[in-house]
Amino acid sequence: MSFLFPYRYEKVPVILVGNKVDLESEREVSSNEGRALAEDWGCPFMETSAKSKTMVDELFAEIVRQMNYAAQPDKDDPCCSACNIQ
């Protein structure tokens, strides 16, 4: 059985993430370059470090915020007769 999802309502969350911010001396992309690219893409930009746990919790919180925002279709234009958006 396959399901057709209402893709016209789905907005894929995008977050540009620079990792290993703890290795400043080995940086290949500047923060300014990352911010500029994120601005071009229209998405948030964050720098993290899994090793030092810098901004990791904040990144996951932002992912959840983006997912919650993207999952809300227009109440006046439901995707099908089975939808009950309140």
Image: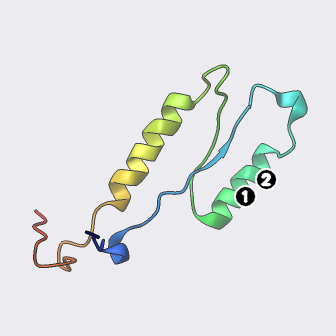
Q: Is mark 1 on a helix, strand or loop?
A: helix
Vertical order, 26 against 72 (above or below): above
* Nearest to the observer: residue 2 or residue 84: 2
> Which residue was labeled with disc 2?
33
Q: Do the residues labelled 1 and 2 touch (CB within 8 Å)?
A: yes
User: Which residue lies at the image location 57% right of the left edge and 58% below the top edge?
Assistant: 43
Q: In which quarter of the image is residue 31?
A: top right
Which quadrant is the C terminus positioned in?
Answer: bottom left
Vertical order, 63 against 72 (above or below): above
Q: In which quarter of the image is residue 11?
A: bottom left
Vertical order, 49 against 71 (above or below): above
Disc 2 crowd rating (10 Å Cα; few below 14, some 14-19, many 20+) is: few
Residue 80 rendering spot, x and y as whole percentages? 17, 78
CA gap between label 1 and label 2 equals 5 Å
Residue 71 rendering spot, x and y as whole percentages? 32, 60
Which disc is residue 81 wearing? none
* Nearest to the observer: residue 76 or residue 67: 67
- In the displayed structure image, the side of residue 19 where residue 3 appears, left or right: left
- In the displayed structure image, the side of residue 5 where residue 36 appears, left or right: right
> Which residue was labeled with disc 1?
36
User: Which residue lies at the image location 37% right of the left edge and 61% below the top edge?
Assistant: 70
